[in-house]
Image (cartoon, rainbow, N blue to C red):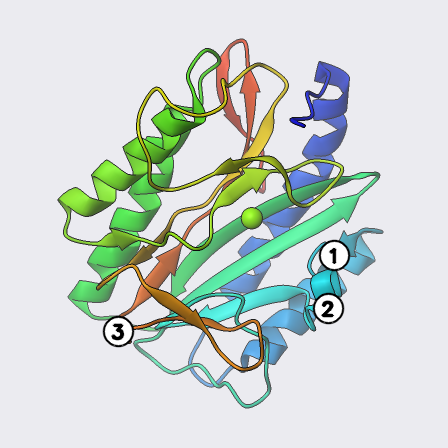
Amino acid sequence: MIVIKTAREIRKMQDACTLSARALKLAGEAVEPGVSTKEIDTIVQKFIEEQGAKPSFLGYGGFPGSACVSVNNVVIHGIPSKKIILKAGDIVSIDVGAYLEGYHGDNAYTFPCGDISKEARMLLDATKESLFQGIQKAVAGNRVGDISSAVQKYVETRGYSVVRDFVGHGVGAKLHEEPSVPNFGTAGRGPRLIPGMTIAIEPMVNQGKYDVEVLSDDWTTVTKDGSLSAHFEHTVAITPDGPVIMTVPD
Ligand code: MG
């Protein structure tokens, strides 16, 4: 069932989204050579808890961190670790959610660590832009497939691939709600977008092939071919006036 929120509920959810965005921004500012992914996680957890909220991911399905920190060929769900030390040239995907007063906000961004290669920069730019291509289609009356198709076309035109095994989702009182929002698909297909829906659009884009595999820790998801991967995500509200990006730090 797709939960439709009232304008008042969306206003309430805005606080959780703003907080998630501020936590993600802080996490990104901490990305530099020599920092462990555990240190980034601690910054996120402390900040969210100080604001009287809860990190959405901590303990979710047993996840042992407040942020997913996924480096280079890690697509998503990287477990923060003292042993993973960032170095110049890495790309660092950070996914953060905050739960405040009954609602979740969810967002992700891939940050460069120091100077990165031209190839890595191009992947980041393309993935970020594909998110905005998707958001532009998050318009009442359109269908989920319009978002999916816009993301996929943008990405594949540039020679990259979109991950199939993980997709975006509705978000609200629960972290993962219906509908699924794939980053691949056919325009005009899928559930109709109507005002009051809040969805997380989150392209995961691989430099190489789209196949991924989950490591034996049951979380860390890597590209099968070892290529780099990037991940950008916003929580977006469908409104009568068009898409509203809710995960903005202010
Ligand atoms: Mg998400």
Which circle's residue, 3 or 1, is located before the other in the chain? Answer: 1
Q: Which residue is mark 2?
A: 62
Pointer 2 with pointer 1, Cβ within 8 A: no
Q: Is disc 2 placed on a helix, strand or loop?
A: helix
Residue 237 at least partly seen: yes
Q: Give me the disc on residue 67.
A: none
Residue 101 percent location from the top left of the image: 84, 39
The C terminus is located in which quarter? top right
Q: Amino acid at mark 3?
A: Asp
Q: Give me the disc on residue 225.
A: 3
Residue 50 percent location from the top left of the image: 81, 58
Q: Quadrant of residue 58?
A: bottom right
Rendered view: 207 above or below 153: below
3D distance between C-alphas at marks 3 and 1: 35 Å
Other residues around mark 3 within 10 Å, as few (<14) / some (14–19) / many (≥20): some
Residue drawn where x is 80% and y is 59% of the image: 49
Q: Amino acid at mark 1?
A: Ile
Drawn side of residue 156 relative to residue 136, left or right: left
Q: Amino acid at mark 2?
A: Gly
Q: Is disc 3 placed on a helix, strand or loop?
A: loop
The one of 111 and 243 positioned closer to us in this rendering: 243
Other residues around mark 1 within 10 Å, as few (<14) / some (14–19) / many (≥20): many
3D distance between C-alphas at marks 2 and 1: 19 Å
3D distance between C-alphas at marks 3 and 2: 27 Å
Single out the mark in the foreground, 3 or 1.
3
Q: Give me the disc on residue 48.
A: 1
